[in-house]
Amino acid sequence: MSLADFCLGIQPVGEIDPVYLKIIAGSFLGELRIKSVILPCLDPPEYAFDKRRIQYNAGTMINQLEQMKFKECNKVIALVDADLFIPVFSFVLGEARIGGTSALVSFYRLQKNPGRAAKVALHEFGHLMNLDHCRHSCVMKFSKNIEQLDSIPAIYCNYCLDHIRYMISATIG
Ligand SMILES: [Zn+2]
Ligand SMILES: [Zn+2]
């Protein structure tokens, strides 16, 4: 078994520029040597729209994604161009539960910068692989806005990388 047996699903939600899909798939291949499949596009997440906040509820979207069956995928990163929130923050760039199956990445506040989206995707994937936030110079460092996101590297520190590799080998047995 090798890391190449692990399969990551990249799930566009609503219309997503294919450049983003390619750059995100490329960053997982480059950083972790894992391959990804681009899944058929889902409808825009109107079920998660909050009329008072005029934003989309990230928790509601994750609940929905976690209920879906993604046959050949071990984990799924969903990409959306909607402004996301969770109740304690005015907005979030992405969202994932530790050890969950599906994570969310929002392009809405990234100012059309696919490199930033790839960073958020690697960060949320780390949470799916049981990692919490990291204090080192690492993509797992918490960032609450794009200024902070720009100040962290697009790679995992050695500790987080070892952990993810271990988790991937445990997943594919
Ligand atoms: Zn985080
Ligand atoms: Zn780290």
Image (cartoon, rainbow, N blue to C red):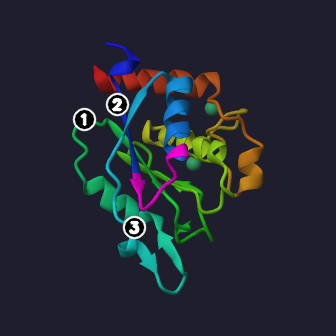
Look at discs 3 and 2 and give the one toward the viewer: 3
For label 1, the residue is 72
Q: Which of disc 1 and disc 3 is earlier in sequence?
A: 3
Residue type indicated by callout 2: Cys
- Which type of secondary structure does the marked residue at label 3 adopt? loop
- Say above or below: 143 vs 108: above
Instruction: Between residue 157 and residue 24, name the one nearer to us.
Output: 24
Comes first in the chain, label 1 or label 2: 2
Q: Is 96 situated above or below 64?
A: above
Mark 1 residue element: loop
Residue occupied by mark 2: 7
- Are the residues at dot 1 and dot 2 in contact (C-beta closer than 8 Å)? yes
Name the amino acid, label 1.
Glu
Q: Residue furthest bottom?
A: 52
Picture quadrant of residue 38: top left
- Work out which residue is located at the far front of the displayed protein and give it: 18
Mark 3 lies on residue: 44
